[in-house]
Amino acid sequence: MKKLILMRHAKSSWSDGDLADVERPLSARGKSGADAVGMWLNGLGVTPDMVISSSANRCQETWQRVAAKLSQTPEIQHIPALYMAGSDRILDIIRTQAKGDTVLLLGHNPGIGMLARDLRVDPAPHHASFEKYPSGATTILKAPVEDWATLNFGMSHLMEYVTPKGLI
């Protein structure tokens, strides 16, 4: 049994209109949201063995803040192809890159939210924001696979879903 943590980057800043989209940093709200999600994961005792992240600045900054709240820091792999990837592409990346029993994938909408919906076999959580998958939204899924290469849509069970807004 594997655990997959799907996280959308925390709220980013639009204050510098000259920055390319991939270079945007976190806003003050995003920083506190990432901290809150890190404390939540730590409180659950969930530490990934590996992190697969988009190389966008806001994803890297989100992970740095989450990692600072965890009891151990796992290996991280930055993958530029995750930037704006769809759920099919993200699933392919998980299948080929994931290592360990618990993997956190940090990416962008709409792909990360679609993947959270597509992997589940359970009904959606009773949370009004799940369909929108807002900034910092985090889902923990349990996948009945022994090898990440066999992960597929419609086979994972929802364990947890949270948003920074629900934690702060």
Image (cartoon, rainbow, N blue to C red):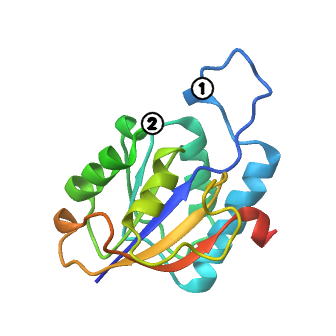
- Pinpoint residue 57: horizontal percent, then vertical percent: 57, 36
What amino acid type is highlighted by mark number 1? Asp
Q: CA distance from mark 2 to mark 1?
A: 10 Å
For disc 1, the marked residue is 21
Residue 89: % across, % down: 31, 44
Mark 2 vs mark 1: which is more N-terminal?
Answer: 1
Q: Does 24 appear above or below 6?
A: above
- Residue 35 placement, left or right of 123: right
**Label 2 crowd (10 A; few <14 / some 14-19 / many >=20):** some
Residue sitting at 47 percent across and 62 percent down? 117
Q: Amino acid at mark 2?
A: Tyr
Judge from the rendering whether residue 6 lies leftward or rightward of residue 26; answer left or right. left
Q: Is residue 51 above or below residue 22?
A: below
Q: How many marks?
A: 2
Residue at 76% x, 71% y: name it.
167
Q: Which numbered tag is attached to residue 83?
A: 2
Taking 111 as reference, is 57 above or below it? above
